[in-house]
Amino acid sequence: MAAPLPSPSLPGLPLPTPSASPALPVTTAPSAVGSILGSGESAAGATAGTAPAAPEHPIYQPSPDEQSSLPDEPGRLAYEQQQLDVTTDFAAFDATLGGIAIGAGGGSGRFGWPLVVPGGQKAPITQRFGCTNLPGEPYKAECPSKRWHSGLDLAEPTGTPVFASDAGVVRAYRSDTGYGNHILLIHGNGYATLYGHLSSFAVADGQVVKRGEMIGQVGSTGFSTGPHLHFEIRYQTDYIDPCAEIKC
């Protein structure tokens, strides 16, 4: 696990110290935040988004006995802990940053494709959401294999641009395990998206971004077997199948 970087702070935006390793120092000045919010991009106000009809897969922390039913797989326990850390951070950030994200147009519960290749084609899916047989994936008792995949994997070469699926506030993390370098994008109204295994960031921690804005580049950092984007949609403490929202 990479050593934690200094906890970010942004004047005017009270950011609690993340429980996972925070990434980039915040560079977005208060005036820059104001200019983004005042740009006229989808000024949605504080209208509540529509909650998913049946949120899926709450965060699950197995008991030690259940954990012992799986072999010791490199990175699995660290990956599970990282997921729990992100969930803790998300709850705090949604409370403090959700209103800013909503003001920028986020929080509607509608999402766009985060990875589109030249010509407008959708990136190929290499692993879908749900139960999986792949070793090293997080534990889930309900799966026959006891392993499951919390998002959607989209394969493209390292350096391919990654775009914000909805407007929101950036939380950027550097890590050498699990999600690798990743962005948690707070959208407001209980929604967030996560973009994992990035090779680089195109935005600063704390920055407000528009829907469709480039936020990073595809990579293979963390627990990864090749260049791809791991994409998650979260609603409060639940994971949502991305294909149900972005129409795979």
Image: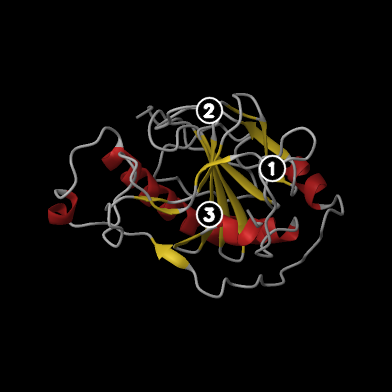
Question: Which residue was labeled with disc 3?
Answer: 93
Vertical placement of residue 113 versus 91, above or below: above
Q: Name the front one of labels 2 and 1.
A: 1
Report the Cα–Cα distance between label 2 and label 3.
Answer: 29 Å
* Dot placed on the residue nearer the N-terminal end, 3 or 1: 3
| 69 on left or right of 245 | left
The amino acid marked with disc number 1 is Lys
Kind of element beneath mark 2: loop
Q: Give the x, y percent position of residue 72.
A: 19, 37
Question: Residue 214: x, y in percent?
Answer: 71, 37
Residue 207, visible in the rendered structure: yes
Quadrant assignment for the N terminus: top left
To which residue does mark 2 refer?
A: 227
Residue 188 vertical position relative to residue 184 in the rendered view, above or below: below
Closer to us: 245 or 80? 245
Q: Nearer the viewer, mark 3 or mark 1?
A: 1
Q: CA distance from mark 3 to mark 1?
A: 30 Å
Q: How many marks?
A: 3
Picture disc at residue 67: none
Q: Which residue sits at x=61%, y=31%?
A: 156
**Looking at the image, which is closer to me, 59 or 45?**
59
Q: What is the crowding at mark 2: few (fewer than 14 residues within 10 Å), some, or many (at least 20)?
A: many
Mark 2–mark 3 CB contact (< 8 Å): no
Mark toward the start of the polypeptide (2 vs 1): 1
Query: Which SS class for mark 3?
Result: helix
Which residue lies under the disc numbered 1? Answer: 122
Q: Amino acid at mark 2?
A: Pro
Q: Quadrant of residue 199?
A: top right
CB atoms at circles 2 and 1 under 8 Å apart? no
Please, what is the three-letter code of the amino acid marked with disc 3?
Phe
Q: Quadrant of residue 65?
A: bottom left
